[in-house]
Amino acid sequence: QVQLVEFGGGLVQVGGSLRLSCAASGIIFRLNTMGWYRQAPGKQRELVATSASGGSTNYADTVKGRFTVSTDNAKNTVNLQMNSLRPEDTTVYYCNGIVIGLDLRRNEYWGQGTQVTVSS
């Protein structure tokens, strides 16, 4: 079993910065893709940013140029540096990981979510 534990989040003023971190633990052969999603109340969960094992990254248009996703494969962690935060970035952020187990099967895991609040 794999667990994703998130760190960071909190309250910040408009234009400020926050850094989210997520650590994967458990029986992991290799991380395939790790990233971040967010979900506002009453809305579907949406992609924020992902980083694949080959180094490619993918960002939502709404965060391009403001957020940066990075991974540390040695530590099985993914980070999200969020700059120039806006009130509309306020919501719960979830860490996501697609992990390859020892049986070489890919499984998807989610963190518990961390609240980000941007005050105006």
Image (spheres, helix red, strand yellow):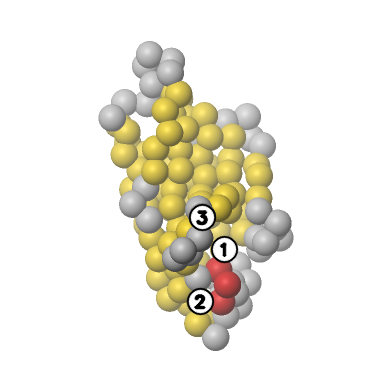
CA separation, marks 3 and 2?
20 Å
Q: Amino acid at mark 3?
A: Gln
Residue 30 percent across, percent down from the top left:
45, 25
Q: Which residue is depicted at the point 58% across and 72% down?
A: 88
Task: Give coordinates of residue 87: x percent, y percent.
Answer: 56, 76
The residue that appears at 38% across and 13% down in the rendered structure is 103
Residue 1 horizontal/vertical position (percent): 28, 30
Q: Nearer the viewer, mark 1 or mark 3?
A: 3
- Identify the element where label 1 is drawn: strand
Structural crowding at the residue carrying mark 1, measured as other residues with C-alpha within 10 Å and reported as few (<14), some (14–19) or many (≥20): many
Q: Residues within 10 Å of mark 2 (few under 14, many from 20)?
A: many
Work out how far the residue at label 2 is from the one at label 1, CA to CA, in angstroms.
Answer: 11 Å
Instruction: Tell me if mark 3 has few (under 14), some (14-19) or many (20+) residues whose alpha carbon lies within 10 angstroms of its own.
Output: few
* x, y percent for residue 97: 45, 38
Disc 3 versus disc 2: nearer the observer: 3
- Residue 39 in view of the camera: yes
Is the C terminus in the top left, top right, bottom left or bottom right quadrant? Answer: bottom right
Residue 33, placed above or below residue 70: above
Residue that mark 3 sits on: 44
Secondary-structure class at tag 3: loop
Q: Nearer the viewer, mark 2 or mark 1?
A: 2
**N-terminal label among 1 and 3:** 3
Q: Which residue is mark 1?
A: 82
- Mark 3 and mark 2 lie on one chain; the one further toward the N terminus is 3
Q: Report the disc number at residue 118.
A: 2
Q: Residue at x 55, y 53 (%)?
A: 46
What is the count of numbered marks?
A: 3
Instruction: For mark 2, give the secondary structure.
Output: strand
Residue 67 versus residue 108: which sits nearer the camera? 108
Tag 1 near tag 3, CB within 8 Å? no
Residue 72: tell me if it is visible: no
Which numbered disc, 2 or 1, marks the residue that appears first in the sequence? 1
